Amino acid sequence: MTTVTLAEIEAAADRIAGHVRRTDMDLSTSLSERAGAPVHLKHEHRQITGAFKLRGATNALLTLPDDARARGVACTSTGNHGRGLAHAASALGMRCVVCMSKLVPQNKLDAIAALGAEVRIIGKSQDEAQIEVDRLVEEEGLTDIPPFDRAEIIAGQGTIGLEIVEALPELETVLVPLSGGGLIAGIAAAVKGRRPQARIIGISMERGAAMKASLDAGGPVEVEELATLADSLGGGIGLDNRYTFEMVRTLVDEVVLLGEAEIAAGIRHVYFEEREVVEGAAAVGVAAILAGKVKPTGPTIALLSGRNIAMDLHRRIVNGANSLEEAR
């Protein structure tokens, strides 16, 4: 299996120190009372760019040779990876082109452009946007920095796992949003490298969960990309997936899927009970507990992965909308 090791994650932690925030983790009284076990929240939505993606993007750029840095980088994104890469590239004085589909919310497009990246809207899926990235690599010599299936990206995201174990050595379960698998693969490698008995549970949405479909099929498959409150979890895993599919299959103990109303309930709970604004993808761990689809029996961590939700959408959800259709 092509994998990312604990040593690589530890090296990434040293490399990105000073470039990203070490985010807080604290006990949720409301969730702990509901679950009957201690539930802690890892506040990665407080990262500099509002999402965990900055870690992997920064690690990837810091490992590039000088000639590649001079030419610049490109990526596909559902929003948060592009924002993280744009921020990291700007800090290093590099050209950055972010290619996204028409499904990406406007607030995420605007935030990426504000960081100086070139934004290109291509097609209705990440797979279609990837065609433009491939052209930029072939014709202009840019380096493709994919959202998840690259060793340096996985190692960067895995630094969250190191922080979790350091903050709560006795942890039993970690709930991680699951999309292409870079986040959960890195966290699982870090957590199980330090605490092998810990359980890692991936949480995704019912609408277009590509990794879950691929796990069920025994290999990467294409899944239609659908509009969802958890828009950051959209997109495929790549039919030529090199890292994350096998790492998820080997290291992740369970995958849970949520309906749109359950995701909306998670967003509302985090807002009303925790006084935090998070996007749908970030609320899925909390939502899984609320829905009874995960039942903690010991110290549990739910990762709040990002806050980059359009505020008008957030307002409609906290006022009772249970889907994108209801929020329009």
Image (cartoon, rainbow, N blue to C red):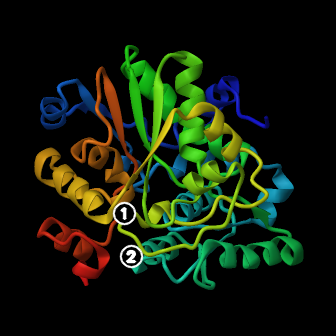
Q: Quadrant of residue 301?
A: top left
Q: Is 173 placed left or right of 75 in the picture?
A: left
At label 1, which amino acid type do we have?
A: Asn
Q: Is residue 83 above or below residue 42?
A: below
- Report the residue at 42% width, 80% height from top: 106
Q: CB atoms at circles 2 and 1 under 8 Å apart?
A: yes
Q: Quadrant of residue 108?
A: bottom left
Label 1, residues with CA under 10 Å away: few <14, some 14-19, many ≥20: many
Residue toward you, 245 or 74: 245
Q: Residue 1 at what x, y percent from top left?
A: 79, 35
Q: Is residue 165 above or below residue 95?
A: above
**Quarter of the figure that contains the C terminus:** bottom left
Q: Secondary structure at mark 1?
A: loop
| Precedes in sequence: disc 2 or disc 1 | 2
Q: Residue 105 at what x, y percent from top left?
A: 42, 77
Q: Is residue 99 visible?
A: yes
Circle 1 is placed at which residue position?
Answer: 308
Q: Is residue 110 above or below residue 248?
A: below
- Report the residue at 37% width, 21% height from top: 167
Residue that lies at the very extreme toward the front in this rendered image: 217
Residue toward you, 84 or 30: 30
At label 2, which amino acid type do we have?
A: Asn
Q: Which mark is residue 293?
A: none
Circle 2 is placed at which residue position?
Answer: 107
- Report the residue at 33% width, 28% height from top: 300
